Structures are given as structure tokens and as C-alpha cells.
Amino acid sequence: MSGTLKLCIPALVMTSCTIASPASGEETQAETSGNPVTLSDLAVTALRSARLDTSNAAVMGATASSRKVLAAAVRCALSSTQTIAFSVGGVTYRDPGGVGLAPSWTTSALTATQASWVSACLIAHVNDVSQLVWISVRGSNATLAASSAELTGYRVEEGAFWGNVFVDLGAVAAYSCVGVDQAIDDSYGDLPLRQCAQWDGVSASNKSPCGMRYAGTCSSACSTRTAPYAGCSYLGGAATGPVVTTFLAGALPQ
């Protein structure tokens, strides 16, 4: 399955968004609310690794912010043929799958490894720019193998993401490192529309512009020196195997 996701990020004044049908082999991400997931949403997440059934989904999606996070998690975890439906306050919500990193979530609790992959995928989709952005998500997980179309169309290396978004598995945390292309020049392609992988430029800060914990360049923070990255750590801490690397559309500078 393609690792390309299309993030639906409408203008702030809009309550929903519509985008053209995806090309073959690509996915379309549309959070329940139609707005991007932010770190503020993650701060109040109710995601748990327990089996994703109707009743548990209703608990995890009890508020507008938690529904955005749940929709993104479902999109990362379930396959494109799966959907989870649940009701909150008499309203029924249906969240489609997409990437397929943990399709068994509907029948059993996530393993620690599955939860780490879903977390990394979800964190990779966090953004603070309210505009449509298409990204290619890649990693050592076979599900994230890039197609030839992705390798051609998404060549700008943004960075890598990892962490934890499940409240029953520890503290919620989002980490990022900056990729080769964004570290050199973040003014071309879609890089200006994605700010979470790079350093915020504040003296003595270890944060990205959108508030993630910034680990430095991916080539120095991760055990693999080239993308897709793996074994990444924050300021010398324990290395995390499941890491999602993002590539963006746009021509590389000559």
C-alpha cells in the first residue's frame, strides 16, 4: 500500500473540506472535524491501546479534539477497507482506515510495537499550517514502502517523527528531527507549509515551531544516517525503532 497520505487542512474559518479523488495507490486523510491535528489536540488525547470497538471508540472520541486525534489514529492504523463507527451525544461518526499499520486493532489490543508505529504516523501528520499539504510517509515497516510514483513525486526530505500518543502506554510525547533538505533550505517545495520537523530558532530551545521536542538533524539523532530513518533518540535518550520519515512534493533546487 502506498505510504502517501493527503492531509486535509482547510482554512480556519471552514468547518469541513472537500478534495479531489486521490490517484490510484494514494490515501486521503480527513479528520472527523475537517481540521488538522495539533499538539494542543494531542495534549487532551484520550487514545488507548485497547481494542478499537464501538464502545471504546466512543470513549476515545468523546470531545471534538479527541475525535480529531482518533480519526488520525484510525487512518494510520486501519487499512483502506476498514471503517470504525461510533456515536457520541446521538451523533454517529465514521472514521475510515488508510495506511494499515495495525489493521488488527479492531479485534485485539495494539501491541507495544504497533502502538509505536501508529504514534509515529499520527505525529508525522501534526501540522500548524492551515493549508492542504500532501506528504509521503516512509519507514522500515513494510506497509510504508514507497511506490515508484512517490519516489518520483515526493523527493523533498522534510524530517522524521516518533513518540507516544496512547495515554495508557505512558506520557504523551512528540519528537522530531530535521531532514537533509529542510535543514539546508526550507523555502522551496512544500517545506514552508510544514514546520514541525525543524528547530524553532529560539536560543537554548529544544523545540520545533509547532512545539515538538526537537532532536536535531536526523542523521545525528538516528541510528540510520539516511532516510527513511530509524532508531532515533532525543538528547541522548533511549532510541525508538518505529520512526516515520516524511517527504514532500516540490522540485529540489538545482
Image (cartoon, grey):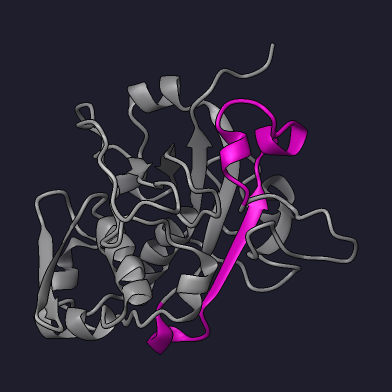
Query: Which residue is pictured at 42% across the width and 85% down the height?
Result: 167
Judge whether residue 69 can be spotted in this image: yes
Q: Quadrant of the C terminus?
A: top right
Task: Point out the stretch of residues depicted in magenta.
Answer: 166-195
Q: Is residue 64 left or right of residue 11?
A: left
Please check the rendered image and state whether residue 151 is part of the magenta-colored stretch, yes or no.
Answer: no
Residue 105 horizontal/vertical position (percent): 19, 71
Quarter holding residue 191: top right
Residue 101 horizontal/vertical position (percent): 28, 57
Query: Which residue is pictured at 26% across the width and 61% down the height?
Result: 32
Judge whether residue 107 can be spotted in this image: no
- Above-or-below relation of 230 to 134: below
Residue at the far top: name it: 254
Q: Is residue 244 left or right of residue 7?
A: right
Query: Which residue is pictured at 17% across the width and 53% down the height?
Result: 79
- In depth, the one of 152 and 126 nearer the eye is 126
